[in-house]
């Protein structure tokens, strides 16, 4: 089949090279955006006097016919035409005749693909943002019922201080809010129209790019044609936001996977989100959570792949940039898949709150509260820290818990200990003491919960 650029050439393209350079296998998903952009370009050409109204209307009708074929899965995709742009253009000409060949006037595939990707990205960002909000909603719902449910907090994976489960769940709500903000910022920076930049120098026809931007829903046209066709920052920013989101999702999945072990016993996955073993009949594996954790690797890899592709490319467009699409599409698909399965999984978890409450007070979890008790009695914190460290060492040697030590034993280490020390080191007292904004006291967590709920009403 004759290539659209064949006038310069006398020889045929090597079949292997043709297969190697074709992008139709992955860029065909951009078809709706290519048709949308082509319709807007036809209207722009008409406003510039380059198409008659009849020609414009014929092209617009033909594009809708192409859209119908694609949606009806009857469109004749032809890999030898290299990409989705040329497939649509060739089919348009077949359907409406030579007038279809006027559509590409003043336009390059360089500004065309940049437009398609930006339109696609803006749609993806909206879907990802909705998925993150749905995930936040699931976490908020669980947090609302666990404001009074103590559990151990950890540092270095060692039990540290008591917190409430709601405080833990809301931590991820705030992480995902930052993710939403990053994606919205990415959306704003992608909201720039590249069409009309031509191959690199701008179009030579009097196109009203401001009107074209309004037609396609962009905030403004790009101010520099070289930048417009060679820029892939919008994709890199999306991939970076996706990688950070993947890291947050992975951390949540990692904790839940750990908590489901017999050693922790804090949570049980519903059968709908777990699998069994092919050999060990007793097993219940948290495969969905493990795969969420694992998919962070491909989100990271996609970012690094495109960063590496773009590094050192001379202005303006280079075919290397074709390699942006598969990582971009894969990250979009991966995020959307995770954000579809995660909210119902979170809603189906069974938290073993009694086991969590028991664990919250074990392993000297309120030792910091014992030091704080001495501080309130007037002892400098560093001295209080040392005193309590020696108390803990004594308890370990004696095989006792902190609560099991008698007042007499405690007073061997400081005469500031008094009868009220028992109440100070109870788990509930430890929680109530941390009532500062952002703390784990139920009242403070309740205020954070109200803030988290406000995120759910934001677009």
Image (cartoon, rainbow, N blue to C red):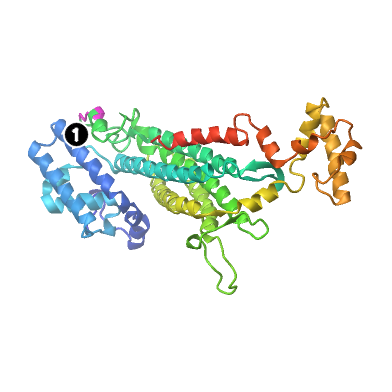
Determine the image quadrant of residue 2.
bottom left
Residue 325: image x %, image y %? 39, 49
Can residue 6 be seen here? no
Crowding near pointer 1: few (<14 within 10 Å), some, many (20+)? many
Q: Is residue 375 left or right of residue 232?
A: right
Residue placed under numbered mark 1 in the picture: 44
Decide whether residue 202 is among the magenta residues: no
Residue 164 lies, with reference to residue 447, above or below; the image says below
Q: Nearer the viewer, residue 207 or 273?
A: 273
> Residue 117, located in which quarter of the rendered image?
top left
Q: Which residues are magenta?
A: 206-210
Q: Is residue 444 left or right of residue 29?
A: right
Q: Main secondary structure of the magenta part?
A: loop
Q: Horizontally, is 257 left or right of 203 in the view?
A: right
Q: Which residue is rendered at x = 9% and y = 36% of the image? A: 52
- Say if the magenta span includes residue 209: yes
């Amino acid at each position: 089949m004759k290539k659209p650029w064949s006038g310069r050439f006398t020889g045929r393209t090597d079949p292997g090279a043709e297969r190697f350079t074709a992008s139709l296998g992955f860029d065909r998903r951009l078809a709706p955006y290519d048709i949308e952009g082509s319709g807007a370009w036809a209207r722009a050409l008409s406003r510039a006097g380059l198409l008659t109204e009849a020609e414009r209307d014929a092209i617009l009708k033909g594009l809708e016919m192409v859209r119908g074929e694609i949606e009806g899965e009857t469109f004749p995709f032809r890999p030898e035409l290299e990409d989705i742009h040329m497939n649509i253009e060739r089919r348009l000409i077949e359907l409406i005749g030579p007038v279809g060949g006027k559509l590409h006037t003043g336009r390059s595939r360089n500004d065309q693909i940049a437009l398609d990707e930006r339109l696609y990205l803006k749609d993806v960002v909206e879907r990802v943002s909705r998925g993150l909000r749905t995930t936040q909603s699931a976490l908020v719902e669980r947090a609302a019922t666990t404001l009074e449910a103590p559990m151990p907090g950890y540092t270095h994976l060692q039990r540290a201080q008591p917190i409430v489960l709601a405080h833990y769940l809301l931590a991820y709500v705030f992480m995902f809010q930052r993710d939403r903000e990053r994606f919205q910022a990415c959306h704003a920076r992608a909201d720039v129209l590249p069409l009309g930049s031509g191959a690199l120098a701008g179009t030579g026809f009097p196109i009203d790019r401001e009107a074209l931007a309004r037609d396609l829903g962009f905030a403004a046209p790009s101010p520099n044609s070289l930048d417009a066709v060679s820029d892939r920052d919008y994709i890199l920013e999306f991939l970076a936001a996706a990688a950070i989101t993947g890291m947050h999702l992975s951390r949540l999945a990692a904790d839940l996977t750990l908590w489901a072990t017999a050693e922790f016993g804090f949570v049980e996955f519903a059968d709908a989100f777990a699998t069994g073993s092919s050999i060990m009949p007793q097993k219940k594996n948290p495969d969905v959570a493990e795969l969420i954790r694992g998919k962070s690797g491909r989100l990271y890899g996609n970012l690094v792949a495109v960063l590496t592709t773009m590094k050192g490319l001379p202005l303006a467009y280079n075919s290397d940039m074709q390699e942006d699409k598969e990582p971009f599409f894969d990250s979009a698909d991966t995020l959307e898949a995770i954000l579809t399965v995660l909210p119902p999984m979170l809603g189906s978890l069974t938290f073993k709150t009694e086991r969590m409450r028991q664990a919250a007070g074990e392993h000297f979890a309120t030792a910091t509260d014992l030091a704080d008790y001495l501080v309130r009695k007037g002892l400098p914190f560093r001295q209080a820290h040392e005193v309590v460290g020696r108390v803990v060492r004594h308890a370990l040697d004696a095989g006792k818990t902190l609560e099991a030590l008698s007042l007499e034993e405690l007073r061997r280490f400081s005469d500031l200990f008094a009868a009220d020390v028992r109440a100070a080191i109870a788990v509930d007292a430890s929680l109530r003491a941390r009532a500062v904004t952002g703390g784990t006291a139920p009242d403070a967590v309740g205020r954070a919960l109200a803030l988290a709920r406000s995120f759910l009403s934001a677009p």
